Image: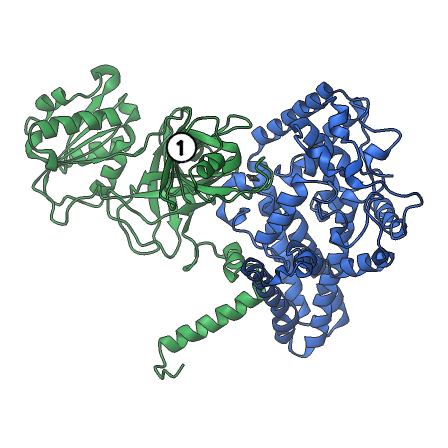
Amino acid sequence: MTVIQNKPDNPIAHLSAEDIETIGRELDAIRERVVASRGERDAAYIRRVISTQRKLEIGSRVVLLFSLFPPAWIVGTAGLTVAKILENMEVGHNVLHGQWDWMRDPKIHSTTWEWDHVSPAEQWKHSHNELHHTYTNVLGKDNDLGYGIMRVDEDQRWHPFHLGQPLWNFINACFFEYGIAAYDLELGRNLRKGRHKKPEFRARARAVGRKIRRQVLKDYIVHPLLSGPSFLHTLAATFTANLLRNLWSHSVIMCGHFPEGVETFSRRSIEGETRGEWYLRQMLGSANISGSRLMHIMTGNLSFQIEHHLFPDLPSNRYQEIAPEVRALFDRYGLKYTTGSLPRQVFSAWKKVVRLSLPNRKAPRRVDDRPAPALAASGV
Amino acid sequence: MTTTVPNPSGKAALRGRILRLAASVTTPLLPDDYLDMVAPLRSGADLRGRILAVRPETADAATLVIRPGRDWRGHTPGQYVRLGVDVDGVRQWRAYSVTSAPARRGAPISVTVKAIPDGVVSNHLVRRTRPGTLVQLDQAQGDFVLPGRPPARVLFVTAGSGVTPVMGMLRAGAPGDADVVVVHSAPTPADVIFGAELRDLAARGAIRLVERHTDTDGLLTVADLDRLVPDHLDRETWACGPLGLLDALEAHWTAAGHGDRLHTERFRPTVISPGEGGTVTFARSGVTVDADGATPLLDAGENAGVLMPSGCRMGICFGCVLPLRQGAVRDLRNGELTTAVPGDGVRIQTCVSAAAGPCDIDH
Ligand code: FES
């Protein structure tokens, strides 16, 4: 079972309310230190990543103009894939989190950035930064838990629809950016409730439509056309790059909250949540991926999902630096720092998706009947 | 389009079509984002400049020679230019007088900067900036300039780095063959920025130079002027220096009924002295409220009926970010101050920022 309150061994039963607030203060201190030391080195880092990404993208697209030749196809596709991954993960995701707003460079700012993605930055910031990061892993509030199409926790009610979820998950992985756009629009819910006629929804849907048109025009029409005789090859190359980028980001993101060992929370548990309790929820609700420096950059440092969830607005290049300290804090307070290699975490997440496509072996309790763990633990 | 005019609108249309095509390959970026990587000074780009040289002037002042971008429209002597400089990774904007004489298009310009104690930007520019660095620029502005037809008798009163706009005028050869007196005050002879050049002008008879050294002569006062330049009230006067000096001069000229003959340049038009709370203006909504130092601006706005953008309300989502046009705010999480003067374009998270003095929010 993954809902802490259902566990016979509640992972935070040993913490007093005071402990939890102390943890909060220690984390605040780490944040303060990083904020105070942000500077030239960090600014140079993000500028370097952005310029590398742009050169790689332009270079790859030029090579793909000759994609008729197999070596050019391979080199160009590989380059474009890496460029798209960097763009979405280390640059887009992090800039849109406001991680680089402190530089006051209007060109690298959360309010002006647009990314290579079919979900417009503005909508994504709302569903991701606001809903997901505020209500991390709260059942019924954080739609990232299964993206509204999957059951990823024993405490979510089973429905025959879930039998197909390994397949839904795979399709979602292939067309992840479209999945995210639909998710940001809350497409399913809005259609079901007949809200699709509301002007507000229509405006947002139109914005997504415009973004999709521009992305498709670039990747599947203009760039292939410019390639002349290489038209079809370039088309296939961009399709492949988008597919690989989607599979990669889907895997990384699944590893953030789905692997075994990650906790979920009931709606009631966050009522009147203190700062310490909020931190604690982020700590228990996220999982890391271990790996090399290159791997961390390619995941947009979301391999430090725990650190990212504690401090979503700190520059991504600093997560690796503070990770040992954060981990030591987990150890000191007897908390589980969930981490593992990419294959292991991906496997673990998929296993859960498959397992939960079937009903629970024992009947689940209703989500809101459960005692609120953080509050119970803090003696409130 | 049915127009048959071939040029230049034909060319422009073609250019427009090429740009649109280019934009459809670079989306979501613009072709400019890529061009900036190779030709940041090209015409059509945001205005920037490249520092060509940093020349020390005195122990704490240096001249920056800057090649401005192609769209630089030039300046009139006495005007200033706003420079956007990245210091410790943070873009900061400051205004400096252009000290070079106007020259042909594309020629470098120069500004002269004096490092003031604790001055984040000035110290960075004087001591740490290296040739090759890109800076952001605004077009030259300011009305501290000589009229088209210079008056016959001119007085310049300057102190410290206040000499910089005046040097721009003198180097331009202005004001012609007028009778020019320069009263300049600095701590010691060695602290006089452009000392050698000014003395040389005096030796050649172009100006009458009155040097005052405050370490030995004390601060320059209005009473001193009676003695140093007895006819000062009859001269068209341009003054630039510390606020105290300018205030005293203004009072003196006004009292004598010649206020219109005095032109002053004040480099810190709004002095921000951060405190607790203040008057918050939501410029576009046309709402002004008093907020204390503990109330987030988001709440202050909402309480006054302003429709504010918001999200998590705890500083994590950046859904509440708005431009601070001017004023000072304090981050409620760590007490850090952020100040802005017009043009800085500082954006703040309203849910975790409170007023630390009067502030003007662009919303
Ligand atoms: S409302 Fe989320 S950061 Fe201000």
**Mark 1 crowdedness (10 Å alpha carbons): few <14, some 14-19, many ≥20:** many
Return the chain for callout 1. B
Q: Quadrant of ligand 1?
A: top right
Label 1 sits on residue: B122
Q: Position of residue B33 (x, y in %)?
A: 52, 57
- Which quarter of the figure is the C terminus of chain A placed in? top right
At 64% from the left edge and 49% from the top edge, which residue is drawn?
Answer: A127
On screen, residue B93 versus residue A326, left or right, reads left
Looking at the image, how many numbered discs can be counted on the residues? Answer: 1
Q: Hey, which quadrant is residue A71 in on the image? A: bottom right
- For chain B, the rendered hue is green
For the residue pair B31 and A374, the one nearer the viewer reads as A374
Q: Residue at x 73, y 40 (%)?
A: A138
Residue displayed at 68% across by 79% down: A229
Residue B22 horizontal/vertical position (percent): 53, 67
Q: Position of residue A280 (x, y in %)?
A: 73, 30
Left or right of residue A68, residue B28 in this image: left
Q: Which chain is assigned blue? A: A
Which residue occupies the foreground of this view, A164 or B140? Answer: A164
Relative height, residue B37 to residue A345 (above, below)? below
Residue B157 visible somewhere in the drawing? yes
Can you give x and y, in whole percent of width and height, for residue A109 in the image? 53, 46
Q: Residue furthest right?
A: A361
Q: Quadrant of residue B155?
A: top left
Position of the N terminus of chain A, as image quadrant, is top right
Residue A67 visible at all: no
Closer-to-camera residue (A238/A253): A253
Q: Tell me which amino acid carries mark 1.
A: Ser
**In the shown orientation, is residue A193 left or right of residue A206?**
right
